[in-house]
Amino acid sequence: MIAATAVQPLAMAVHELATNATKYGALSGRDGRLTLTWTTGGGRLRLVWQERGGPPVVAPSVGGFGTRVLRATVTHQLGGALSLDWDPAGLTCMIDLPMSRVLAGDAPADPVLSRIAELS
């Protein structure tokens, strides 16, 4: 279970990624695909957001509001790390979070868990 203190920052990060995918990325066209993968291990939760099939991606020259929201929620609120790969084939966002900041107090400390969700 996700800790109450992590729900809002995680939701904001995913909402920002989804909004941008819908406006400018893979979900802005008929052929676009989005894959969200998460795994746990070593006391970490790793999320990988990967877009493919949308318009060619161009790295922004300066970070905009969305990038600031992602960095603030992932690094400051959740104590994690954020990596954005602006590959022309599609954006890949990697979020690495400490389980101690994400799991509710009564959840197992390091569950073995892997999930994949695909949206189109």
Image: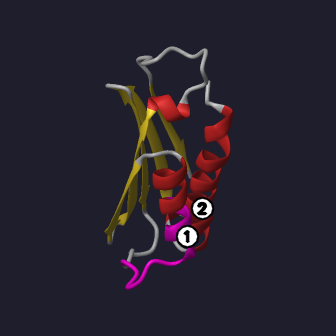
Residue 111 shows up from this direction: yes
Residue found at x 36% / y 77%: 59
Q: In the rendered structure, find residue 22 and report the number of the disc placed on it.
A: none
Q: Mark 2 packing: few (<14 Cα in 10 Å), some, or many (20+)?
A: some
Kindly indicate whether the residue at mark 1 contacts the one at mark 2 (C-beta within 8 angstroms).
yes
Q: Position of residue 32 (x, y in %)?
A: 50, 61
Observer-nearest of 27 and 104: 104
What segment is highlighted magenta in the picture? Answer: 59-70
Residue found at x 56% / y 75%: 65
Q: Position of residue 17 (x, y in %)?
A: 55, 60
Observer-nearest of 87 and 62: 62
Secondary structure under tag 2 reads: helix
Colour mode of the rendering:
secondary structure
- In the image, residue 17 sits, relative to residue 66, either above or below, namely above
Q: Amino acid at mark 1?
A: Gly
- In the image, residue 8 sits, relative to residue 70, either above or below, namely above
Observer-nearest of 105 and 22: 105
What residue does disc 2 label?
16
N-term mark: 2 or 1: 2
User: Does the magenta run of residues contain 69?
Assistant: yes
